[in-house]
Image (tube, rainbow, N blue to C red):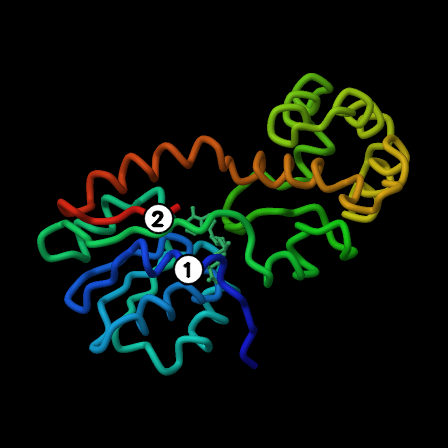
């Protein structure tokens, strides 16, 4: 069955990429292919697209969504960290016309009962985009020192109660599920009276960024993107 996904700022992305029917575009974060489909449909004939994705389930759903567009897209289960290498083997003159990075989670991942990205589903503490990676949220929550946990919550989640939450996490080990972790954070912070943000939002965000090493990866892919873009090519993040 087709999994619906509404791509973020799709009109702006297409406008900024200024899609050329003879061009080659790299969607570094294919997800459910919402942006790739928009790029493919932006011109007639369609341009060429290479879609990169590390989550196998997302790739399967993307293929279903792309059923009418498969001729002009090559899907690779590879990380955008290998961008330069990928372009060397897949682009004629080693250059591309546009690079798109749509960072964060897809709606599929957020709703997944296996991934553990959301405090609203009862799931194991995983949070890996790529299930081949070794570090999970479970590993961090149950093994990291107070100092490391505190640092993650403070810097990656901008969590004001980072110290208290880190303490409670250590005293509540073992913590195996999203709901257990969410309860611990809610105990520390209390229910949010204005209901705007769930108390565990920042903790979950911080753990996801730490698990996937997202901050360290960004400069690597941005640097690679600038090297593979042809003169006048566009990078959209
Ligand atoms: C916000 S979603 C992209 C949604 C997509 N634009 C769409 O329209 O469906 C980000 C995606 O990037 C993927 N991702 C994360 N790290 C990656 C990496 N290093 N290489 C390739 N894809 C990655 C995630 O698995 C996730 O599916």
- CA separation in Å, label 2 and label 1: 14 Å
Please report the residue visible at 66 percent of the width from the left and 61 percent of the height from the top.
112
Indicate if the residue with disc 1 has its beta carbon within 8 Å of ligand 1.
yes
Mark 1 neighbour class, 10 Å CA radius: few under 14, some 14 to 19, many 20 or more: many
Q: Outermost residue toward the left?
A: 93
Which of labels 2 and 1 is toward the front? 2
Q: Quadrant of the N terminus?
A: bottom right
Give the mark nearest the N terminus, 2 or 1: 1
- Position of 70 compared to 48: left or right? right
Indicate if the residue with disc 2 has its beta carbon within 8 Å of ligand 1.
no
Residue 136 in the image: above or below residue 35: above
Residue 222 in the image: above or below residue 48: above
Q: Which residue is mark 1?
A: 30
- Residue 8: x and y in percent read 49, 58
Q: Which residue is mark 2?
A: 236
Please report the residue visible at 43 percent of the width from the left and 61 percent of the height from the top.
10
- Residue 22: x and y in percent read 15, 66
Can you tell which quarter of the image residue 54 is in?
Answer: bottom left
- Residue 30: x and y in percent read 41, 60
- Position of 231 compared to 132: left or right? left
The foreground one among 170 and 234 is: 234
- Residue 115: x and y in percent read 64, 54
Instruction: Find numbered disc 2 in the image and state the secondary structure of the residue it sits on.
Output: strand
Determine which of the numbered discs, if any, sits on residue 40 in the image. Answer: none
Q: Outermost residue toward the top?
A: 147
Please report the residue visible at 65 percent of the width from the left and 32 percent of the height from the top.
157
How many numbered marks does the figure carry? 2
Mark 2 neighbour class, 10 Å CA radius: few under 14, some 14 to 19, many 20 or more: some
């Amino acid at each position: 069955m087709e999994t619906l996904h509404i791509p973020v700022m799709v009109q702006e992305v297409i406008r900024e990429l200024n899609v050329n029917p003879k061009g080659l575009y790299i969607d570094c974060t294919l997800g459910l292919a919402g942006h790739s489909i928009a790029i493919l449909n932006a011109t007639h004939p369609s341009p060429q697209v290479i879609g990169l994705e590390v989550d196998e389930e997302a790739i399967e759903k993307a293929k279903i969504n792309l059923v009418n567009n498969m001729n002009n897209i090559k899907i690779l289960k590879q990380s955008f960290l290998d961008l330069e290498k990928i372009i060397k083997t897949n682009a004629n003159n080693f250059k591309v016309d546009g690079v798109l990075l749509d960072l964060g989670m897809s709606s599929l991942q957020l709703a997944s009962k296996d991934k553990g990205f959301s405090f609203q589903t009862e799931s194991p503490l995983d949070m890996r985009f790529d299930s081949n990676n070794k570090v999970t949220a479970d590993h961090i929550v149950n093994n990291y020192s107070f100092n490391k946990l505190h640092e993650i919550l403070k810097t990656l989640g901008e969590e004001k109660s980072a110290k208290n939450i880190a303490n409670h996490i250590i005293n509540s080990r073992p913590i195996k599920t999203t709901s257990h972790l969410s309860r611990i954070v809610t105990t520390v912070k209390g229910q949010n009276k204005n209901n705007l943000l769930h108390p565990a939002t920042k903790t979950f965000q911080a753990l996801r960024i730490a698990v996937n090493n997202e901050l360290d990866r960004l400069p690597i892919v941005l640097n690679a993107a600038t090297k593979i873009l042809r003169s006048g090519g566009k990078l959209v993040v």
